[in-house]
Amino acid sequence: MVGRTQEEIEKELSKEYIPLSYAEYEEGLSNGKLLGLRCQSCGKITSHPMPVCQWCGSRDMERVELSGEGELLTFTVIRVAPEGFDAPYVPCLVKTLEGPTVIARLDLTPEEASQELIGKRVKMSGTYKYEGDKYSAGAHVCPVFRIIE
Ligand SMILES: [Zn+2]
């Protein structure tokens, strides 16, 4: 069947529109928790929070806590920081054990970062707070991962 029944739509509309706000996501990070949303329609997980499932568009999602572990997909070294950031730093993409890919920082110096690290197991080890720039509406936090393998 294509689309959803009226009953399914009403069920979704009866829920809180966003079961995990960005502020709650960042609060979770600050408490050492990587939070996401599990879609009740397709079962996939997204992180960071979104108002609809990134895979099927459903709004029927519930908050879940991820393990905070995953695989380092890739990274780069920033030596000239954008406004509101301090350089150098090592932003990265982590494929979590639960599925979603998250943007984070690696807990490494640029001198420690090398291509051999791609594919290594990583675990969330804390957060980094940045003051932001004229585009980002103030300070935010992002997860920091360290190599565990
Ligand atoms: Zn879905």
Image (tube, rainbow, N blue to C red):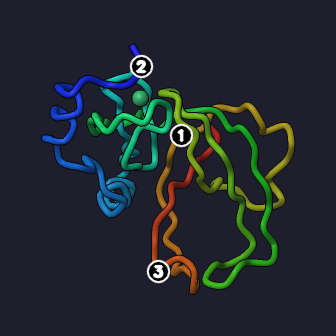
Q: How many marks?
A: 3
- Helix, strand or loop at mark 1: strand
Q: Nearer the viewer, mark 3 or mark 2?
A: 2
Density class for disc 1 (Cα within 10 Å; few <14, some 14-19, many ≥20) is many
**Residue 92 appears at what percent x and percent y?**
68, 51
Q: Quadrant of the C terminus?
A: top right
Front position in the image: 31 or 26: 26
Whether label 1 touches label 3, CB < 8 Å: no
Q: Which residue is mark 2?
A: 2
Residue sitting at x 34%, y 23% = 41
Density class for disc 2 (Cα within 10 Å; few <14, some 14-19, many ≥20) is few
**Above or below 106: residue 73:** above
Whether label 3 touches label 2, CB < 8 Å: no
Front position in the image: 146 or 25: 25
Residue sitting at x 62%, y 56% = 105
**Residue 104 appears at what percent x and percent y?**
59, 53
Q: Nearer the viewer, mark 1 or mark 2?
A: 2
Q: Which residue is mark 3?
A: 137
- Helix, strand or loop at mark 3: loop
Mark 1–mark 3 distance (CA, rounded to whole Å): 28 Å
Q: Is residue 22 left or right of residue 89?
A: left
Mark 1–mark 2 distance (CA, rounded to whole Å): 39 Å
Q: Quadrant of the N terminus?
A: top left
Q: Earlier in the sequence, mark 1 or mark 2?
A: 2
Q: Earlier in the sequence, mark 1 or mark 3?
A: 1
**Above or below 9: residue 32:** below
Q: Amino acid at mark 3?
A: Ala
Front position in the image: 6 or 81: 6
**Residue 27 appears at what percent x and percent y?**
31, 60
**Above or below 100: residue 29:** below
